[in-house]
Image (tube, grey):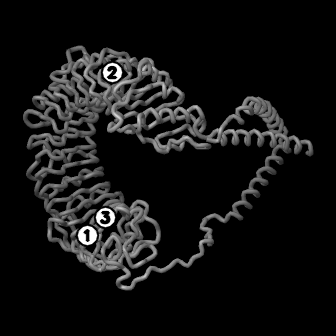
C-alpha cells in the first residue's frame, strides 16, 4: 500500500508540474505576439500618414496586451491576431487618399477577417498591392466597400491565390469593368453600387462555388438570359435590385437555378405581372423569398402565376401598386409565412376571404394604406400569427371584441394611427403570454372597469399609448403595468394622466431605456431608484406638475449631469415650475435646501459578496481530499485499473518530459504582453 501511495504521489506531482508549466506558459504568452504588436504599430503609422490620429489605444508601451486594443481580436489560445476591424479609420480631410501597402498585413499569419471599408483606398504602393495580400492563407472574410478602387481592382482579382477566402465585399467602389476571372472557394460576393453592365455575368462564370451574389444598384438592363447564370449551380441568394431588368429568358433545355431560394428584384422595371411570373419560373421554381418592393411595374401587380411558386414563404411587395382584388386572390400561397404590403395603396375594407386562408402566416404587414372598416372575423383563422401591423390606416372597431383577442401567438402588435377603440385596461389580452410589443398611439382610448384582481400572462418590452392628435383622457395608468418587469420603452405622452408620478415603473423595470410621460398632469416627487439603470437613455416628463426631482441620494435638485443624464439640458425639464437645480436657472439654495454631507468614512469597506468564502474554501479542500481518497481506494481494490493507471502515468511522464524540454526555452522568451 505504501509503494502504491508513493507511486501515486510521484505521478500526481509530475502531472501537477506539467499542468502548472502549461498554465504559466499560457499566462506569459497570453496576448498578441511581439512581431504582431510591432506590425500593428507600423500599420497605424501607415493609416495615419502624414498626421492622422486614428487608433489612439494603439500605443508603444511596456507590458501592453495589444489584443485588448480597439478593433483587434485575437485567438485566446495562440495569441495570434484573427480579426482587424479597420473600417472608417482614415479621414479623407485632411489626409487624402490612402495608397495601400499590403505587406503590412503579412505578419498576421492567422488573420481570418479584415475590414477595410470606407477608408478612401485609391490604389497601392508599387509592388506592394493586393497580390501580396494573398499571402494571408487563412483569410476568409475581406470587406473593401466604400473605397475608390475602380479600375485598379483588376490586379487583385486573381482570387485563386486566396485559398481560404469565402466572403468578399466590393460594394460602392466605382468599378466599371471586370475582366473574366477565376475564383476559388468564394461563397459570398457583393458588388452592389458600382457601374457594372450585363457583361459582369460572363466575367463571374468562374465562381461556381458562389452561394450569394449581390449585383444591386448597377447598370444591368433589358433581358437576362438564364444560361448566363447556369454556372452558379450552388447559388442560394441573388440580389438584382435597382437595375433596369425587364425579364429573364430561359431557352428550352437550360436548367433553372434549382438551389436559388432568395431573390431580390426591388426597384426593377418589369412590363407586367405575367412577364414577371414567367421570368421567376424561368429563373427558379424553388424560390422561398421574393423581394419586389418599390418596383416600377407597368400596371398593377396581380396574383396570376403566383400559385406556381408553391414553395414561397416570404413575399415583400412594399410600395408596389397592387390589383384591388389582390388580398382576395392570394389564398393559393398556402406555404406563405410572411406577407408585407406596406404602402401599397390598398383601400376599402379587408375582405373576408383569400388572405384569411393563409393558415401558416406568421407575419402580416399592412401599414400605411387606406384600409377602413373593422377587422374581419376570418382574421381569427391565422392562429400562427406572431406579427400584425395595420398602423396608419383608417380602421375602426373595438379591439377587445375583435379577432385579435383569440390570436394567442401574437408577439408584436401595431395599431397606431387608426380609429380603433382601445380599452385602457387591455384585459382582453390577459392570456397572450407571448406578447412583447404593443403600439397603440393615436387611437380612441376607452374606459373600462379595471382592478388589481387580474394579472396578465405577458411581459411587455415596448408599450406606446400616446395620444398627440386626439383629445383622449386616461384617469390613471393601466393596472397591468404594475405587473410588468421587462419594459424597455414606455410612452404615455399626452393622455391627461393625473396623480402621483409612477416611480414604481422605474423600480420594477431595471432594463428601461426610455420613459415618455410628457404633457400630462402628474405631480411629484419623482424619485430615482437606488439601483443603477445602465440602459436608461431618455426620461421625458416635460409639461407636468412635478416638483423636486432628487438624485439617488435624494438631494432636492435635478440629477447630476453625468452618465445617462449628461445630455440633459434645460428643455428636458420644461413645464415643471417647481423643479430646481442645474441646468435650470432656479437654484436649490435660494429656498434653503441644502445637500446632505456624506458622513461615511472613506476607509469603510462593505463586503457585498453572495458567497461565504470561508465555507467555499473549506468545502473545496474537503471535496478535493475526498476525491483523492476515493481514487486511492479504487486503485487498491482493482489491480487491472491500477495497472492501467500506472501505464497512463508512464506515458504522461514521457510526453511531459519532451514537452518541457521543447518549451522550456520558449517560456523565457515569451513576453507578458
Q: What's the residue at 20%, 31% (across, down)?
A: 308
Q: Position of residue 246 (x, y in %)?
A: 14, 26
Distance in Å between CA atoms under marks 2 and 3: 52 Å
Q: Which residue is mark 2?
A: 152
The reply to whether discs 2 and 3 touch (Cβ–Cβ < 8 Å) is no
**Residue that label 1 marks:** 518
Q: Nearer the viewer, mark 2 or mark 3?
A: 2
**Sooner in the amino-acid sequence: mark 2 or mark 3:** 2
Q: Quadrant of residue 67?
A: top right
**Pointer 3 local density, CA inside 10 Å: few below 14, some 14–19, many at least 20:** many
Find disc 3 in the rendering and name its residue. 490
Measure the alpha-carbon separation of dots 1 and 3: 12 Å
Q: Earlier in the sequence, mark 2 or mark 1?
A: 2
Q: Secondary structure at mark 2?
A: helix
- Tell me the residue at 27%/67% (across/down): 571
Q: In x, y percent, where is residue 254?
A: 25, 16
Check disc 3 and report its element: helix, strand or loop: strand
Residue at horizontal 17 percent and vertical 59 percent from the top: 417
Q: Which of 664 and 473 lies nearest the eye of the viewer? A: 664
Amino acid at each position: 500500500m505504501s509503494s502504491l501511495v508513493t507511486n501515486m504521489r510521484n505521478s500526481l506531482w509530475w502531472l501537477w508540474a506539467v499542468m502548472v508549466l502549461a498554465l504559466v506558459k499560457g499566462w506569459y504568452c497570453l496576448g498578441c505576439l511581439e512581431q504582431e504588436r510591432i506590425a500593428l504599430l507600423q500599420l497605424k503609422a501607415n493609416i495615419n500618414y502624414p498626421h492622422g490620429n486614428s487608433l489612439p489605444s494603439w500605443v508603444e508601451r511596456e507590458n501592453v496586451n495589444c489584443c485588448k486594443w480597439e478593433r483587434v481580436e485575437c485567438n485566446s489560445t495562440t495569441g495570434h491576431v484573427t480579426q482587424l476591424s479597420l473600417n472608417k479609420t482614415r479621414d479623407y480631410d485632411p489626409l487624402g487618399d490612402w495608397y495601400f501597402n499590403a505587406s503590412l498585413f503579412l505578419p498576421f499569419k492567422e488573420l481570418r477577417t479584415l475590414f477595410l471599408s470606407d477608408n478612401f483606398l485609391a490604389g497601392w504602393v508599387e509592388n506592394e498591392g493586393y497580390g501580396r495580400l494573398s499571402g494571408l492563407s487563412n483569410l476568409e472574410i475581406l470587406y473593401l466597400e466604400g473605397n475608390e478602387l475602380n479600375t485598379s481592382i483588376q490586379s487583385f482579382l486573381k482570387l485563386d491565390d486566396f485559398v481560404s477566402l469565402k466572403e468578399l465585399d466590393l460594394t460602392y467602389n466605382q468599378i466599371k469593368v471586370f475582366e473574366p476571372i477565376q475564383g476559388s472557394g468564394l461563397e459570398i460576393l457583393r458588388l452592389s453600387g458600382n457601374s457594372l453592365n450585363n457583361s459582369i455575368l460572363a466575367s463571374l462564370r468562374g465562381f461556381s462555388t458562389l452561394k450569394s451574389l449581390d449585383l444591386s444598384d448597377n447598370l444591368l438592363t433589358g433581358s437576362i438570359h438564364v444560361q448566363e447564370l447556369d454556372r452558379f449551380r450552388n447559388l442560394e441568394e441573388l440580389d438584382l435590385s435597382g437595375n433596369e431588368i425587364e425579364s429573364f429568358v430561359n431557352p428550352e433545355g437550360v436548367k433553372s437555378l434549382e438551389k436559388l431560394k432568395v431573390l431580390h428584384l426591388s426597384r426593377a422595371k418589369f412590363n407586367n405581372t405575367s412577364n414577371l411570373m414567367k421570368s421567376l419560373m424561368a429563373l427558379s421554381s424553388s424560390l422561398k423569398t421574393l423581394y419586389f418592393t418599390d418596383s416600377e411595374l407597368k400596371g398593377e401587380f396581380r396574383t396570376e402565376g403566383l400559385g406556381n411558386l408553391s414553395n414561397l414563404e416570404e413575399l415583400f411587395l412594399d410600395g408596389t401598386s397592387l390589383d384591388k382584388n389582390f388580398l382576395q386572390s392570394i389564398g393559393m400561397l398556402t406555404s406563405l409565412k410572411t406577407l408585407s404590403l406596406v404602402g401599397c395603396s390598398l383601400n376599402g375594407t379587408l375582405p373576408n376571404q383569400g388572405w384569411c386562408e393563409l393558415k401558416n402566416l406568421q407575419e402580416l404587414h399592412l401599414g400605411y394604406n387606406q384600409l377602413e372598416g373593422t377587422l374581419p372575423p376570418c382574421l381569427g383563422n391565422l392562429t400562427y400569427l406572431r406579427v400584425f401591423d395595420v398602423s396608419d390606416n383608417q380602421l375602426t372597431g373595438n379591439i377587445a371584441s375583435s379577432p385579435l383577442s383569440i390570436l394567442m401567438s401574437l408577439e408584436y402588435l401595431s395599431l397606431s394611427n387608426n380609429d380603433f377603440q382601445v380599452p385602457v385596461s387591455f384585459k382582453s389580452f390577459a392570456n397572450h403570454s407571448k406578447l412583447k410589443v404593443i403600439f397603440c398611439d393615436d387611437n380612441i382610448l376607452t374606459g373600462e372597469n379595471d382592478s388589481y384582481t387580474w394579472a396578465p400572462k405577458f411581459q411587455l418590452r415596448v408599450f406606446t399609448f400616446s395620444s398627440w392628435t386626439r383629445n383622449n383622457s386616461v384617469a390613471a395608468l393601466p393596472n397591468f403595468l404594475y405587473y410588468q418587469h421587462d419594459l424597455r420603452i414606455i410612452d404615455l405622452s399626452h393622455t391627461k394622466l393625473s396623480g402621483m408620478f409612477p416611480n414604481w415603473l422605474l423600480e420594477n423595470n431595471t432594463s428601461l431605456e426610455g420613459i415618455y410621460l410628457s404633457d400630462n398632469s402628474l405631480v411629484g416627487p419623482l424619485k430615482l431608484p437606488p439601483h443603477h439603470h445602465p440602459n436608461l437613455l431618455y426620461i421625458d416628463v416635460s409639461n407636468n406638475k412635478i416638483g423636486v426631482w432628487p438624485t439617488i441620494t435624494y438631494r432636492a435638485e435635478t440629477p447630476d449631469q453625468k452618465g445617462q443624464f449628461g445630455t440633459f439640458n434645460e428643455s428636458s425639464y420644461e413645464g415643471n415650475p417647481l423643479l430646481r437645480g442645474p441646468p435650470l436657472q432656479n437654484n436649490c439654495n435660494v429656498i434653503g435646501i441644502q445637500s446632505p454631507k456624506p458622513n461615511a468614512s472613506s476607509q469603510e469597506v462593505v463586503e457585498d459578496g453572495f458567497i461565504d468564502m470561508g465555507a467555499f474554501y473549506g468545502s473545496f479542500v474537503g471535496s478535493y481530499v475526498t476525491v483523492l481518497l476515493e481514487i486511492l481506494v479504487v486503485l487498491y481494490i482493482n489491480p487491472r485499473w491500477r495497472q492501467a493507471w500506472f501505464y497512463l502515468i508512464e506515458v504522461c511522464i514521457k510526453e511531459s518530459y519532451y514537452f518541457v524540454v521543447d518549451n522550456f526555452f520558449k517560456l523565457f522568451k515569451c513576453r507578458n504582453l
